Amino acid sequence: MANVDAVIVMRRPSTTSFSGLKRRVQNLAFKLLDKFCSFGAWFRCHGSQLSTAWCWCQFYSFRQGSKVVLLNIQKPSVLASAALVSSVSNPYRHKVWAIAKPLFSTMGPKKSTKTAKAGKKSKKEEKVDKKEKPENAAKKTPGEKAAAPKNDEATKAKRPPQKRKAEAHSEEEPKPKLKARVSISETIKDTDFSTSSKSPSGKAPNFKIASWNINGIRAWLDKDGLSYLKAEKPDVLCVQELKCDKSKIPAEVEVEGYTGHWLSGDTEGYSGVGMYYKTKPIKITEGIGIPKHDDEGRCITVEFDKFYLVNTYIPNSGRKLVRLKYRTEQWDVAFRDYLKSLDAKKPVVWCGDLNVAHQEIDIKNPKTNKRNAGFTQEERDSFSETLEAGFIDSFRELHPDEEDAYTFWTYMMNCRAKNVGWRLDYFVVSKRFKEHICESLIRSKVMGSDHCPIVLELAL
């Protein structure tokens, strides 16, 4: 989702006001059409649909039985976004979330301004004028053809100009300036990708791994995401949350010098992981070998000469922690056993969006998030248990006391600018592989997603 300036929340309406709610959604759509002309919208509200042409929308599985519609209306240097949540089986079905610019903040009751009254009066006068015949109208005689209407400047001057609603609104208030879509190539200009790090034995790094939750590969490509790959120049780039079936990944994803490998789940537009690599690995494995955990497309393992690289997008426990038990009692247990089986053969580098802030130092507001997904005691304890099985958190190993080091910021409340974030993305490494670590970095200045990239530099 794009940067926004306003969040409009319409709470549960009474049972008799569903038609009014539908009208509000329709009014929002018409305002979008008035503002962006040939660009349309798609909305779903309690079973009723409104659709127009020239739209681009993506569907996201919000949780089981629900949908989130993310709408992007695109124009050169202009982006507005709106999101509506509704589903019959969704406990939040009576809430409609519209994320939009202040332009759409007029969705409430109409204001009885003098300008509005004057506008209504002028419309009535127009209707009366249309019904009345002009004084100079020529009378037809039998057999005489009707005279063609004159199209002179005087006739045009008499007619009051008809304005669209958006134009009339613009006279009352100045149009807000919309923020352009973030270009990743612009955000990497201030980032220094050089390195002077050394391993504990004094060796310079010769193998770099980057990891990034890109929050949709099509949107990432549209924001020039490949510019980051070309600037960072990692040996491997692991990405999470593709939100795209691998058969529909755009052709422009290909990059010279890299080979891509993509994995999507059974639900299109949900989850998915992938990677770019320079050196062909010995073997690539999809999933962890358990069908009930592998159908969401969350794990790819590549085997290199000296280690295994495991790229994962760990399940989120969800709002109201609906998947907490599945996450901690099923997935984490099975995945921990999988990591231990790999570690018994070769050292492991495990990376990705792990959806947990391990310690209070890893989240800006720990006290208010203790029962929110990603910071529950159950999730944190489960992650600790994995580390105790023979692994280390590479960033905390090298930067044990560094504060305000985050990799995720919600789009709401301008959190990224305020650095109100979470550290959810990790490089977890086998303890015996620690001597090869030169540096573990967070590229917090790189924009383009609600997460930022992280980097691990190794001396092999």
Image (cartoon, rainbow, N blue to C red):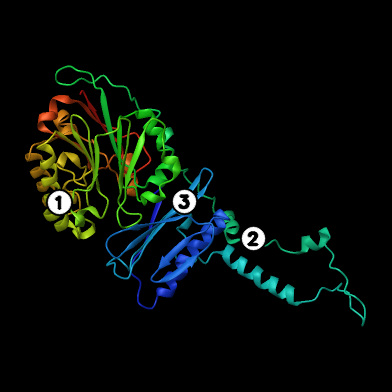
Residue 163, numbered circle: 2
Residue 413, numbered circle: none
Residue 49, horizontal then vertical, whole percent: 45, 69
Task: Spot the residue most to the top.
Answer: 202
Q: Which residue is mark 1?
A: 376
User: Label 2 is placed on what type of residue?
Assistant: Lys
Residue 240, horizontal then vertical, whole percent: 30, 44
Circle 2: element type = loop
| Residue drawn at 54 percent across, 50 percent down | 174
Q: Which residue is mark 3?
A: 80
N-terminal label among 1 and 3: 3
Q: CA distance from mark 1 to mark 3?
A: 34 Å
23 displayed left or right of 152: left
Among the 4 quarters of the image, the one containing residue 279: top left
User: Label 1 is placed on what type of residue?
Assistant: Thr
Q: CA distance from mark 1 to mark 2?
A: 55 Å
| Residue drawn at 82 percent across, 60 percent down | 154
Circle 3: element type = strand
Among the 4 quarters of the image, the one containing residue 57: bottom left
Residue 394, horizontal then vertical, whole percent: 17, 32
